[in-house]
Image (cartoon, grey):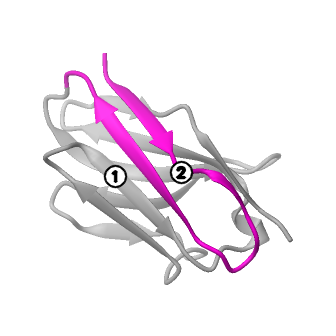
Amino acid sequence: QVQLVESGGGSVQPGESLKLSCAASGSIFSVRAMAWYRQAPGKQRELVAIISVGGSTTYAGSVKGRFTISRDNAKNTVDLQMNSLKPEDTAVYYCYLGSNRSQNYWGQGTQVTVSS
């Protein structure tokens, strides 16, 4: 019943910025954390950034200092501000939601392409 929908993906040149958004809808008892993952062709899916309901954040070393994750607990939304984008950031980005009832939900993914 829970659905996550990502938006904001697209194609940009190196050094430019994008902002991804994810909106969760449906019946959610309690959100433990929301996160962004990404998967490039031929590579494993990796954690980009995660934010707990309390607001604590963790970033992958490759994006620290360039990306910022934020959330609105009341609306069950999470954003990912991506600055100084690099070609290696090219991937499909997935929104994730984990509840305190051991429920895990994934969005459909949104493509981010960084090329000159």
From what the image shows, is residue 7 above or below residue 26? Answer: below
Instruction: Classify residue 72 as left or right of residue 58.
Output: left
**Residue 116 located within the stretch drawn in magenta:** no
Q: Quadrant of the C terminus?
A: bottom right
Provide residue 87's location: percent of width, then percent of height: 78, 69
- Location of residue 58 (image quadrant): bottom left
Determine whether the residue tagged by mark 1 lies in a helix, strand or loop: strand
Q: Which mark is residue 8?
A: 2
Going from N to C along the chain, the mark reached first, 1 or 2, is 2
For image coordinates 66% across by 73% down, the residue present is 85
Pointer 1: what residue? 78
Instruction: Classify residue 93 as left or right of residue 14.
Output: left
Of the two numbered discs 1 and 2 in the rendering, the one whose residue sits closer to the viewer: 2
Provide residue 65's location: percent of width, then percent of height: 49, 84
Task: Tell how many labels.
Answer: 2
For image coordinates 55% across by 31% down, the residue present is 108
Q: Nearer the viewer, residue 112 or 40?
A: 112
From what the image shows, is residue 95 above or below residue 51? Answer: above
Instruction: Classify residue 65 as left or right of residue 45.
Output: left
Type of amino acid under label 2: Gly
Q: Provide the residue span drawn in magenta.
A: 1-27
For image coordinates 18% across by 37% down, the residue present is 100
Whether the residues at callouts 1 and 2 have beta carbons within 8 Å, the answer is: no
Determine whether the residue tagged by mark 2 lies in a helix, strand or loop: loop
- Location of residue 13 (image quadrant): bottom right
